[in-house]
Image (spheres, rainbow, N blue to C red):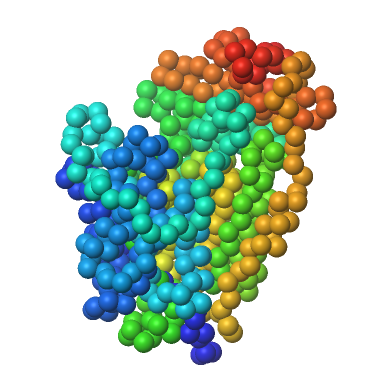
């Protein structure tokens, strides 16, 4: 066997749990502590907690809303360290975004390889099912917050995901933005409305099949394509073409944790070499930041570049990968990622190890930490040799990719340098957003948001005669909404004008 680089980052412990009892006395720190203790025990080394010198936590999704954030601890990493009697540790917290677990793994791996840390505990938890239930029933969650303020360091930067015009026209809701990507992709692929509905259903059905076998999944029922795509009392249309069963399910109680170190430190600590899973490469790339500036809304070229770079840095190609976990908040995220990577969403190897965000569950920013833990388990149990994970933040905006293996690479481990790749993406074509345009436009993509009573608002991305992009809403104009839903309107002409400061579209 070849010599293993002692600086190579390895994952050596994991813990996960899903709670279904809606116990308001269980706090987020309780959940973090339970899975973190399990991850430390999973290393097989008694007393490993004494070697932990960094406690890192994934941000709560509640942190995006100041009113809700007040119910949650502000410095959960410090509270977790106290609970587990971890002394002398740095406390690190990630940025907002679904990419953050993989991003944190990538960045912490570099710090481990560089000797900045020896053993890292990374954990995340969401108790949103209990929290939402308490808001409805008057349950007391006042004990969740501890009055502390964050005193650690940030890993990653928070940045507004939208410009003012995108925000004004409602693109801040992922359930609006991802259907825009979906309809743009369907039209580009020249797939009819009915055929594409079946295609989305087939992809989602395959995800539900994995979730049905996963004891930690929130929804453990295999669903047919027809069940997923058929609108009914328990599966209403959310935003065309997405039904409820196609959409990430946020109201879950879940937590996950992993322990990371280096191959050399693992040997010194006495960790069984058979328990080591190697991070062969990690790449972190941002797409052109604003949705309205991107050249094509059916593509995510930065993600493709990141995945190819991660494979190349790992000295692998797609044929070496045995299992994938492609971030799956909505079907378009899966379809676009797979197209950029060069696989089918229906690849026989499967594109999820958990069951995905609509079925396994979408615990805020923390989903991909569950995917990483599940990937480590599969590789450790020799169900697979190599795996690839993609994690996505905001609106196909922030991408983090990890390549994992049961075997180390040959030679010296080096962190991937993201800067040249990011520079190339930043220099790509940017489309001008004309937020003052009034007059003729051609529809580029669209969606229609629904409530329980039916369609309520259309969202239009269009181009004007100069090729500039225009964002518009329809308002509750049923004639316009009916046409958007009855046909494929992409490429058709209409008019926009200003009403109460917003741009409004009419055929």
Q: Residue at x 64, y 22 (%)?
A: 472
Residue 45 visible in the displayed image: yes
Task: Decide if residue 352 is on the left or right side of residue 318.
Answer: left
The residue nearer to you, when weighing 166 against 353, is 166
> Residue at the right extreme?
466
Q: Residue 273, how many percent across, how many down?
A: 39, 82
* Label tally: 0
The residue nearer to you, when weighing 34 against 484, is 34
Q: Residue 171, how many percent across, how many down?
A: 56, 31
Q: Residue 104, how many percent across, how many down?
A: 47, 61
Q: Residue at x 63, y 74 (%)?
A: 315
Q: Pick the quarter of the image with the C terminus.
A: top right
Above or below, 483 against 442 in this view is above
Q: Residue 56, how many percent across, how many down?
A: 38, 61
The residue nearer to you, when weighing 284 against 355, is 284
Above or below, 461 against 11 in this view is above
């Amino acid at each position: 066997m070849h010599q293993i680089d002692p600086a190579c980052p390895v994952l050596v412990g994991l813990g996960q749990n899903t709670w279904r009892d809606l116990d308001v006395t269980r706090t987020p720190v309780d959940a973090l502590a339970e899975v973190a203790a399990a991850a430390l025990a999973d290393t097989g080394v008694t007393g490993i907690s004494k070697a932990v010198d960094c406690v890192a936590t994934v941000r709560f999704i509640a942190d995006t809303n100041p009113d809700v954030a007040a119910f949650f601890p502000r410095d959960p990493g410090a509270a977790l360290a106290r609970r587990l009697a971890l002394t002398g540790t740095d406390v690190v917290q990630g940025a907002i975004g679904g990419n953050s677990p993989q991003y944190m793994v990538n960045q912490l791996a570099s710090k481990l390889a560089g000797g900045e840390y020896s053993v890292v505990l990374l954990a995340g938890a969401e108790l949103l099912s209990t929290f939402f239930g308490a808001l409805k029933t008057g349950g007391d969650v006042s004990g969740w917050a501890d009055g502390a303020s964050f005193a650690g360091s940030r890993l990653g930067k928070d940045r507004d995901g939208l410009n003012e015009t995108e925000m004004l026209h409602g693109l801040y809701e992922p359930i609006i933005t991802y259907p825009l990507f979906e309809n743009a992709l369907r039209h580009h692929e020249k797939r009819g409305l009915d055929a594409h509905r079946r295609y989305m259903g087939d992809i989602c059905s395959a995800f539900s099949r994995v979730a049905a076998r996963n004891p930690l999944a929130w929804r453990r029922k295999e669903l047919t394509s027809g069940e997923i795509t058929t609108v009914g009392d328990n599966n209403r249309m959310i935003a065309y073409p997405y039904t409820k069963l196609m959409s990430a399910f946020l109201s879950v109680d879940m937590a996950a944790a992993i322990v990371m170190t280096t191959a050399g430190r693992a040997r010194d600590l006495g960790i069984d070499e058979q328990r080591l899973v190697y991070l062969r490469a990690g790449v972190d790339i941002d797409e052109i930041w604003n949705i309205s500036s991107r050249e094509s809304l059916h593509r995510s070229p930065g993600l493709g570049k990141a995945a190819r770079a991660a494979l190349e840095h790992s000295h692998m190609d797609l044929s070496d990968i045995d299992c994938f976990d492609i971030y799956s908040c909505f079907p378009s995220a899966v379809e676009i990622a797979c197209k950029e990577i060069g696989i089918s969403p229906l690849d026989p190897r499967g594109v999820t190890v958990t069951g995905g965000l609509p079925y396994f569950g979408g615990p805020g920013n923390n989903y991909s930490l569950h995917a990483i833990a599940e990937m480590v388990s599969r590789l450790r149990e020799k169900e697979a040799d190599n795996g690839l994970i993609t994690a996505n933040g905001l609106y196909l905006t922030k991408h983090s990719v990890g390549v994992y293996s049961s075997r180390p690479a040959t030679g010296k481990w080096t962190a991937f340098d993201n800067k040249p790749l990011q520079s190339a993406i930043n220099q790509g074509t940017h489309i001008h957003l004309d937020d003052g345009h009034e007059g003729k436009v051609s529809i580029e993509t669209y969606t229609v948001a629904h409530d329980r009573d039916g369609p309520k608002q259309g969202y239009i991305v269009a181009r004007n005669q100069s090729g500039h992009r225009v964002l518009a809403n329809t308002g509750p104009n049923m004639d316009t909404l009916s046409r958007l839903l009855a046909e494929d309107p992409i490429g058709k002409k209409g008019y926009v004008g200003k009403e109460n400061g917003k741009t409004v579209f009419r055929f």
